[in-house]
Image (cartoon, grey):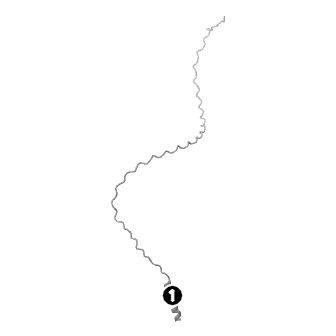
Amino acid sequence: MKAQILFAATAAALLLAACERPTVITQPATVVAVPGPAGATGATGATGAAGAEAQKGDTGATGATGYTGATGATGYTGATGSTGADGAQGQRGKTGDTVVVVPR
C-alpha cells in the first residue's frame, strides 16, 4: 500500500508540473482626477441674430350655409273699433219754395 501512495503522489506531482500555468498580468490602478474648486464665471456671450419670419398658412375653407329659419307665428287680430258718434241733425225742410225746371 505504501508503494501505491508513493506512486500516486509522484504521478500527481508530475501531472501538475506538466500543466502550463498562465502568466498573470497585473494592470496598474487607474488614476482618477479629482476636480478642484470652480473658476470665475466667463463673460456673457453676444446676442444671437433674429430668426427669419415664418410663412403664413393657407386660408381655411368657407363654412356651409346655415339653415333657413322657421316662419313666424300669425299676429293677433286687432280689437273692434268703437261705434262712431251720432251726426248732427239736419234742418227741417221748408214748404212752398219748390222750383220746377221745364226742359225746352
Percent x, y of residue 58: 52, 44
Left or right placement of residue 55 versus residue 44 in this view: right
Q: Which of these two is toward me, 28 or 32? A: 28
Q: Quadrant of the C terminus?
A: top right
Instruction: Name the quadrant containing residue 33.
Output: bottom left
Instruction: Name the quadrant containing residue 60.
Output: top right
Q: Residue furthest top?
A: 104
Dot 1, crowdedness within 10 Å: few (<14), some or many (≥20)?
few
Percent x, y of residue 99: 63, 8
Percent x, y of residue 103: 66, 6
Please determine whether, in this image, residue 74 is positioned above or below residue 86: below
* Secondary-structure class at tag 1: helix
Left or right placement of residue 73 versus residue 9 in this view: right
Q: Which of these two is toward me, 96 or 75? A: 75
Left or right placement of residue 46 versus residue 97 in this view: left
What residue is shown at x 50% (from left), y 84% (from top)? 18
Q: Residue furthest left?
A: 40
Percent x, y of residue 98: 63, 8
What residue is shown at x 51% (from left), y 87% (from top)? 12
What residue is shown at x 50% (from left), y 87% (from top)? 14
What kind of residue is marked 1? Ala
Instruction: Name the residue tied to disc 1.
Output: 12
Q: Which of these two is toward me, 27 or 92? A: 27
What residue is shown at x 52% (from left), y 90% (from top)? 8
